[in-house]
Image: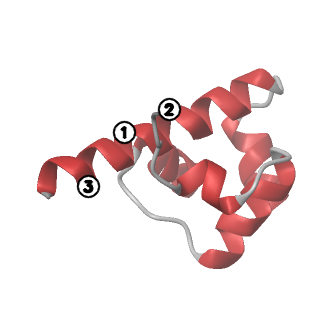
Amino acid sequence: MYQEETLGVISCVNKLRAARKAQGLTQAKVANFVGIERTHYSRIERGDKRPSLKVAFSLAELFGSSVEELFGPEIKP
């Protein structure tokens, strides 16, 4: 189970970084949009911290995604 949780964090980190880079945004711009410090966003993107629900929904809005798509596990057929 620990391995699954770790893989979920890695997947989430990759999704956040990919979404940010796809839109050409800096960590500072993303953090400003969601109302947190850049260092806090950096920790979320690295997987060191988990976002609050408010921040998770704001990130999903910014990236044109759903919370489930950004933070949920990858389900591979």
Asked if the residue under mark 1 is in contact with the one under mark 2, i.e. CB atoms within 8 Å, the reply is: yes
Name the outermost residue toward the front: 77
Q: What is the three-letter code of the residue carrying label 2?
A: Asn
Residue 77 falls left or right of residue 10: right
36 or 24: nearer the viewer: 24
Q: Residue at x 64, y 50 (%)?
A: 69
Q: What is the three-letter code of the residue carrying label 3?
A: Glu
- Is the residue 15 above or below the residue 68 in the image? above
Within-10-Å neighbours for mark 1: few <14, some 14–19, many 20+: some
Measured as percent of width and height from the top left, residue 49 is found at 41, 60
Residue 65 falls left or right of residue 27: right
Within-10-Å neighbours for mark 2: few <14, some 14–19, many 20+: some
Q: CA distance from mark 2 to mark 1?
A: 6 Å
Q: On the image, numbered disc 2 is attached to which residue?
A: 14
Q: CA distance from mark 1 to mark 3?
A: 9 Å
Q: Secondary structure at mark 1?
A: helix
Q: CA distance from mark 3 to mark 2?
A: 14 Å
Along the polypeptide, which appears first: circle 3 or circle 2? 3
Q: Secondary structure at mark 2?
A: helix
Quarter residue 15 falls in: top right
- Is the residue 49 above or below the residue 24 in the image? below
Q: Which mark is residue 5?
A: 3
Q: Which mark is residue 10?
A: 1
Q: Residue at x 42, y 41 (%)?
A: 46
Residue 35 in view here: no
Asked if the residue under mark 3 is in contact with the one under mark 1, i.e. CB atoms within 8 Å, the reply is: no
Name the outermost residue toward the left: 2
Residue 6 falls left or right of residue 61: left
Q: Residue at x 84, y 50 (%)?
A: 62
Measured as percent of width and height from the top left, residue 64 is found at 86, 46
Measured as percent of width and height from the top left, residue 77 is found at 46, 33
Q: Secondary structure at mark 3?
A: helix
